[in-house]
Amino acid sequence: MNRVSILPLFCLLLVLIAPSAMARAAGPGNGIRFHYEAHKLGSNIIKASLSIERDGSFHVVKATVDSAGVTRAVFRMHNRFTSYIREAGLDPWRYIKEVNQKGIFSKKKYYTDIITFDPARCKVIVERVAPPTVQEISVPPQTYDPLSIFLKFFLESEVVNGEKIVMKIYDGIKLKEVTFYAAKAEIDTPLYGTVKAISLESKVAFSSLGDREGTIKIWYTDDERRFPVAMYLKLPSVGNVEFELKKVETW
């Protein structure tokens, strides 16, 4: 059984739908950013974004996650994630987590971690900025941070109908293996109407919800754009949470 926490999973979800078209659009001096809103019972509860750009010899992937609307009365979240991926070999180099969240029923979390990958030695160095701590962790080959793994996957291959995708991810806390299944589908979107899409779905146990099982599902357009258009979470004790693509920016 896969076990993941909601925060790393959400970061993973944002980039699972980051297609090769996004990376190609993010050439030198260019980039692309996707803006999402999550809804529960008709109310906006989360705003998020995902961007990909180039910085010298690196691809840079950034994700933001913020609480919104009625959620802010009981839970505030202002989290930032950045991954630097080497252009040569698409190996992860550095993953930065800036976590700032607190809630009435949850413990306050405020920290910055810098995770540096050494694929040749199958090691990662985890640095906590404050209080300062450093630890070295051994990981299996082909282990990536939640952002870099999908950039590499989608640059190197196309997802096909019926495909099984298994990924090893280290986010600075726990090594995880997540399995997704691909299928063709059609979906109604606010930006593009009804589109042909590829859906990716997985059943996972959420460690932050007592290891109870839920479902995650993602859709991106089945065309040369491969735009991420929607995401869906079915969380134990919470229910369904739907994410919609609201805006796309390029520069």
Image (tube, rainbow, N blue to C red):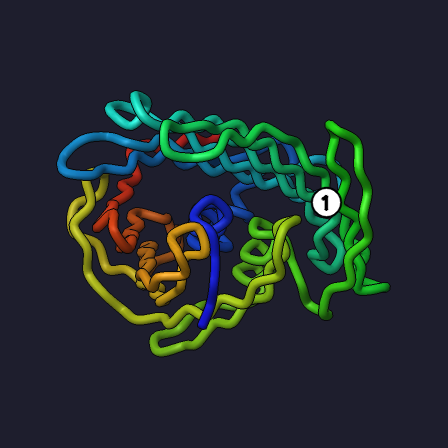
Q: Position of residue 136 (x, y in %)?
A: 82, 53
The type of residue carrying mark 1 is Ile
197 to 10, vertically: above or below: below
What is the quadrant of residue 67 in the picture? top left
The answer to which of 107 and 1 lies nearer the viewer is 107
For the point 43% across and 76% down, the residue is 164
Query: Percent from the top left, x then y, of residue 93?
Result: 75, 48
Kindly tell me whether residue 251 is visible in this rendering: no
- Residue 233 appears in the rendering: yes
The residue wearing badge 1 is 115
Q: What element carries label 1?
A: strand
Q: Which of 17 and 209 is in front in this view?
A: 209
Indicate the position of residue 124 as horizontal and vertical percent values: 77, 54
> Which residue appears farthest toward the right when viewing the image?
121
Residue 146: give x, y in percent of width and height. 56, 52
Query: Mark 1 packing: few (<14 Cα in 10 Å), some, or many (20+)?
Result: many
Report the residue at 58% width, 41% height from top.
Answer: 61
**Going by the image, does 133 lie left or right of 42?**
right
> Which quarter of the picture shows residue 62?
top right
111 to 27, vertically: above or below: above
